[in-house]
Image: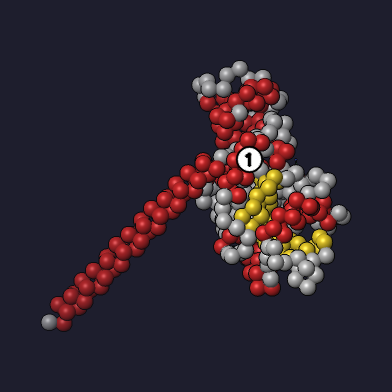
């Protein structure tokens, strides 16, 4: 599915991060959505902040499957120069957890004359503004349900000698792994005009039926999940339960999709994680192989075109030679 995600301010964000690197940056805090801890991880951030330790904060852990959160924490904690911790950004005192982890990642910084400079990043709607507000103890950033509110860099002094820099916008060139596109859309990170809700809901049904079938059955009173019609039949049954019928009896699939996505986002289906570290690694490998195949095909086509053009030039030259004799 082509998800047309062009989060605004991409170049401005890349520039802001480069400027922050030049001005001084000790730790990068990346807020991830604990329901999609792989898909919500920015593929460009690591290269832009190379050499800086990273703290992965799995936010909205209250909505995620605790066993999967533990697996993802292990996965990130095993990466070099990386710490990971779970969070619920609305909690009363997440500041201590985060400041302590950052200090451990950059033990030589944090004095008044050598402040610890921390960059905080995250996809839209991941809870960055909520966290910053909680950390700063005031309404330092606007919060809302629509993605993409935070637009300009802010410096927040969390403690003496501890600065938090908030980046504007997003940097995300394209979504290489198709499943990640679905998961990002299901989570609410992507503006609703950029994807087809029914398509995303059908993918969500597939994941839920595979990993959390009981939740689907219970929430919507469904007896059968694996019957004929597959995911469409399940989404239709959800629509029926949720009153997404038009006069005449047909289910409006987009209404059914909206209902399911809303329930998932609000945690009404229980604590759910859409992807495992192993699945994500497999998808990334497949996407990289696909990319390499496409690059090889493009190169082969380029070479063939070059050979054809140089052959044509030789023929033209030969023709011109013939004409001259
Ligand atoms: P931002 O776009 O990253 O700044 O996201 P916001 O801070 O505006 O949060 C988006 C939505 O997620 C809001 O409705 C928040 O109340 C909600 N939210 C943020 N953090 C959490 C969390 O840890 N758990 C839950 N359940 N909701 C959260």
Q: Is residue 105 above or below residue 314?
A: above
| Badge 1 element | helix
Q: Quadrant of the C terminus?
A: bottom left
Q: Position of residue 283 (x, y in %)?
A: 49, 45
Tell me which colouring the rendered structure shows. Answer: secondary structure
Decide if residue 280 is in sight here. yes
Give 312 or 295, whichever is nearer the viewer. 295
> Which quadrant holds residue 48?
bottom right
Question: Relative to residue 319, is residue 214 drawn left or right?
Answer: right
Q: Position of residue 134 (x, y in %)?
A: 82, 51
Q: Is residue 172 above or below residue 263?
A: below
> Which quadrant holds residue 21?
bottom right
Q: Is residue 72 above or below residue 45?
A: above
Decide if residue 8 is in sight here. no
How many numbered marks are there? 1
Question: Relative to residue 89, is residue 45 drawn left or right?
Answer: left
Residue appearing at x 38%, y 53% in the figure: 293
Residue appearing at x 66%, y 43% in the figure: 34
**Extreme residue in the bottom direction:** 324
Q: Position of residue 144 (x, y in %)?
A: 78, 48
Q: Is residue 225 above or below residue 145?
A: above
> Which quadrant holds residue 218?
top right
Local packing at callout 1 (Cα closer than 10 Å; few below 14, some 14-19, many 20+) is few
Residue with the mark numbered 1: 70
Question: Relative to residue 29, is residue 226 drawn left or right?
Answer: left
**Extreme residue in the right direction:** 138
Residue appearing at x 63%, y 35% in the figure: 67
Give 159 or 307, whichever is nearer the viewer. 159
Q: Position of residue 14 (x, y in %)?
A: 63, 65
Give 210 or 54, whichever is nearer the viewer. 54
């Amino acid at each position: 599915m082509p998800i047309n995600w062009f989060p605004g301010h991409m170049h401005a964000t890349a520039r802001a991060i480069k400027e922050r690197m030049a001005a001084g940056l000790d730790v990068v805090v990346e807020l991830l959505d604990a329901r999609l801890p792989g898909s919500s991880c920015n593929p460009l951030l690591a290269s832009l902040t190379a050499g800086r330790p990273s703290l992965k904060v799995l936010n909205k852990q209250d909505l995620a499957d605790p066993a999967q959160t533990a697996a993802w924490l292990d996965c990130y904690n095993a990466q070099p120069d990386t710490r990971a911790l779970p969070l619920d950004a609305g909690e009363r005192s997440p500041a201590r957890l985060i400041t302590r982890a950052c200090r451990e990642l950059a033990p030589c910084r944090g004095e008044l004359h050598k402040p610890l400079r921390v960059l905080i990043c995250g996809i839209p709607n991941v809870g960055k503004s909520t966290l910053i507000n909680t950390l700063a103890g005031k309404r330092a950033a606007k919060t809302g349900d629509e993605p993409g509110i935070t637009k300009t860099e802010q410096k927040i002094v969390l403690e003496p000698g501890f600065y938090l820099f908030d980046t504007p916008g997003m940097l995300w060139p394209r979504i290489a792994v198709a499943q990640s596109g679905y998961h990002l859309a299901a989570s609410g990170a992507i503006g609703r005009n950029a994807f087809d809700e029914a398509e995303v809901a059908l993918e969500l049904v597939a994941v839920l039926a595979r990993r959390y079938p009981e939740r689907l059955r219970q929430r919507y009173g469904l007896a059968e999940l694996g019957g004929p019609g597959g995911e469409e039949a399940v989404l239709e049954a959800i629509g029926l339960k949720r009153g997404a019928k038009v006069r005449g009896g047909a289910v409006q699939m987009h209404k059914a999709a909206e209902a399911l996505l809303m329930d998932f986002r609000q945690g009404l289906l229980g604590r759910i994680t859409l992807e495992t570290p192993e699945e994500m690694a497999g998808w990334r490998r497949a996407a990289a192989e696909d990319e390499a195949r496409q690059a090889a095909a493009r190169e082969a086509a380029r070479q063939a075109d070059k050979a054809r053009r140089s052959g044509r030039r030789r023929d033209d030259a030969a023709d011109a030679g013939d004409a001259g004799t």
